[in-house]
Image: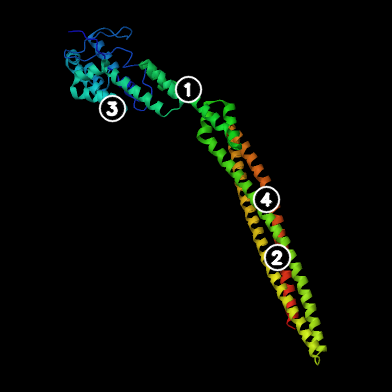
Amino acid sequence: MPQHSRRVFSRRQTLAIFTGVAAGSVLSADVFGTRKAYAASGSGVTAAVPEGAGLPDTDRGKVVWAYRSGRRAVRTAAVAALTGSGADITEFLDQKAPVAWAEDNRFALAESLVTAGPATRNAIGAALSSGDAAVENLLQGGFQTAVDEDLRVAVGTVQAHGSKAVKRAGSAALDTDSSFALRAFLSDGRYTAQEEDDRVQVATILASASPQVSEYASRALDDGSARAIRWFLETGQYIARARDEEAATIQQLVDVVEKEGRRAGLMTDEAVELSHQAVNASEKAKASALEAKAEALAAEQDVARSAKAAGKAAQAAKGAAAAASTAVSASRTAQSAAQRAVSAANAAAAAAALAGRAAANAYRAAIAASKDRAMAGAASAAADVALKLVKFVRTVAAKADLAALAGDAAVRAGDAARSAAVNAAAAAGA
């Protein structure tokens, strides 16, 4: 029988070669196996049993070795031969084994189509369409060109989505034009380079960060681990930004309360002054009206004195009208002051709601920290935010109270002004 040195590869070995190239994963360094197996040929399985196999170099030993190194079809045929007669052993080695090997090889290639890269899939498809000889040729080394092409494409894909360090490492791997270098980049180098890019990205964010983002970024850099850096970039920075926005919103509410409080106080002062003016005007109008009435009664028969009394009555009526107008202005100013006080109170309520949410976040973070030490830092940060928000809310509440007091005072001033105007009008009409 002629001797052959061709290999037949196990399902695991074949899949290790083709799997993952399309996704940029590393290919196994165990290219198409590390142990010698029997190969199929037109005249049978003829290679000797390898040394160290613990089997005699006999026909039966060859069948046992075929069972050990083969796949499903070969194993099924080998079992039938081993449980049969000597003629079955001979028939297996001369006729059934080549067919079984070819079947297993084709099945392994077809199975690897699912996970192979584009170039490798094309090569496998061409081999399967060309017959058993093409399949065997591909398995014995014809795959390498296609696999290398897929490796280069995978490296290029990683480069396209990477930053400076990843691009630099990918270019170095491509420049070597070595399958080993390409695999090394895909299995390890890309991740080392990505860690470098991640640290640079954190440092860039830190350069212009808001308070909470700065704190989170510094904590990640101080930790130094790839996990901490990646957590900050994927999750931590967004939590920090949200907390900064909460703090900014609280500060905005404080500003609103201060502004509305100041305007409420100013309007209160105006309302009080207008009410005083209305009261004074009403008192003068009332006095003038009473004086005019008395003079009119005393001068019933004196035309000149009656005319003079009528003039005084007219003046009193004008004074009453002016007092009423001033009272209306005081009332409107008081209403505006009250509205400003309501705005301040609403801002205070919104600030309190934000503080409540911050406290809830701190509580949840504390619970998480009790279960996971790694969450202790997040719990501490949440507690700090809650404390700051509580201080803000206290400030807001104090200023809202002042605004409310100003509004109340303005309302009272408006009421007093209206009362005085009514009295003045009554006196003028008497």
Q: Residue 411 carries which label?
A: 2
Q: Which mark is residue 396?
A: 4
Question: Which residue is disc 1 drawn over?
Answer: 192
Q: Earlier in the sequence, mark 3 or mark 4?
A: 3
Quarter of the C terminus within the rendering: bottom right
Seen at 77% across and 76% down, the residue is 285
Question: Which residue is disc 3 drawn over?
Answer: 113
Above or below for 9 versus 411 = above
Asked whether, in this view, residue 373 is left or right of residue 57, the answer is: right
Q: Which of marks 3 and 2 is nearer the N terminus?
A: 3
Above or below for 269 versus 291 = above
Dot 4 crowding, Cα within 10 Å, few <14, some 14–19, many 20+: many
- Which image quarter: residue 391? top right
Asked whether, in this view, residue 109 is left or right of residue 336, the answer is: left
Front tag of 2 and 4: 2
Quarter of the N terminus within the rendering: top left
